Amino acid sequence: MPDPDPAPGAPDDAPLLALETAPGGGPLLALETATGRGSVALWSEGALREQTLPESLATAESLLPAIDGLLTSAGCRIGDVRGFALSIGPGSFTGLRIGVATLKGLAFGSDVPVAPVPTLAALARHALPGPGPVVAMLDARRDEVYAAGYGDPEGLEADALPEGLYAGAELARRLPATCRLLGDAAAIGCAPLRSALASGVALQPTGVVARAADVARLGALLLARGQACDAARLVPRYVRRAQAEVLRTGLATEPA
């Protein structure tokens, strides 16, 4: 097991202090399996540890060993965890199901609160400084993207653009006149979107992914606000319905 990745810089650690006011305090265990590269993070005794999952292994095969390694490095056991955070979607259907199922197993039989963190909110934290809100995107295929806009990229509220599934040209029309567009390469490369972008939209570097460390920080804020849920009631936020559901309901997306 490789050593845990170093957590991002100290200035970003401040929101995690909110965990001290959450029920039960730390440690906090966070999972990110919604995007292309999974990771896990542990906030314990003032330290944030993060482990990126190997690309060569399926997430289901590498997730539990990574969690065990993080807990061991911090001198913790799963029974010591007093808060969970999970990247809840949108994202990969398979990845979301793996993350939810794993967390339900870890929390089974306990009353440890779970913070469901919007994946796009975690992604938005990687925006570079610049004018306007941040619009975070993930590729949804079929010339569509999952997107949400954040006036405060350190926060959780999609106040600049509602979270949703957008066709490329539709998203281009709905973007704030000045904003920073952030996302994976496939989303930013969506031809209808790129061809319709206005001059005030700044394309940020591609290849960024949501990270478990970001999920931990935002999860700590949710826990401190009392906006947690029981693990047994946790469901993925797919946004796009599976094709069978589209045929059954006639609706392409889940209710907001």
Image (cartoon, rainbow, N blue to C red):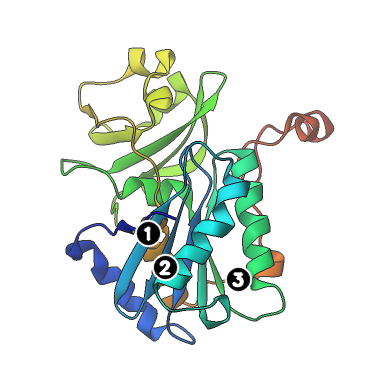
Seen at 66% across and 62% down, the residue is 234
User: Any mark on residue 229, and which?
Assistant: 3
Residue 189 lies, with reference to residue 60, above or below; the image says above
How packed mark 2 is, by other alpha carbons closer than 10 Å (few <14, some 14-19, many 20 or more), is many
Question: Dots 2 and 3: beta carbons under 8 Å?
Answer: no
Measure how far apart labels 3 and 1 are at the Cα level.
Answer: 23 Å
Question: Dots 1 and 2: beta carbons under 8 Å?
Answer: yes
Residue 150 lies, with reference to residue 178, above or below; the image says below
Q: Amino acid at mark 1?
A: Glu
How packed mark 3 is, by other alpha carbons closer than 10 Å (few <14, some 14-19, many 20 or more), is some
User: Any mark on residue 42, and which?
Assistant: 2
Q: Look at the numbered disc 1 and give the secondary structure of its residue.
A: strand
| Left or right of residue 202, residue 119 in this image | right
Which one is earlier in the sequence, the residue at label 1 or at label 2?
2
How packed mark 1 is, by other alpha carbons closer than 10 Å (few <14, some 14-19, many 20 or more), is many
The answer to whether residue 222 is visible is no
Residue where numbered disc 1 is placed? 50
Seen at 44% across and 19% down, the residue is 169
Q: Position of residue 232 (x, y in %)?
A: 71, 68
Q: How many marks?
A: 3
Residue 187 lies, with reference to residue 59, above or below; the image says above
Q: Position of residue 239 (x, y in %)?
A: 60, 41
Q: Could you tell me which quadrant the N terminus lies in?
A: bottom left
The answer to whether residue 112 is visible is yes
Pick the front one: 176 or 95 = 95
Q: Position of residue 241 (x, y in %)?
A: 69, 36
Pick the front one: 192 or 220 = 220
Q: Amino acid at mark 3?
A: Cys
Seen at 20% across and 27% down, the residue is 200
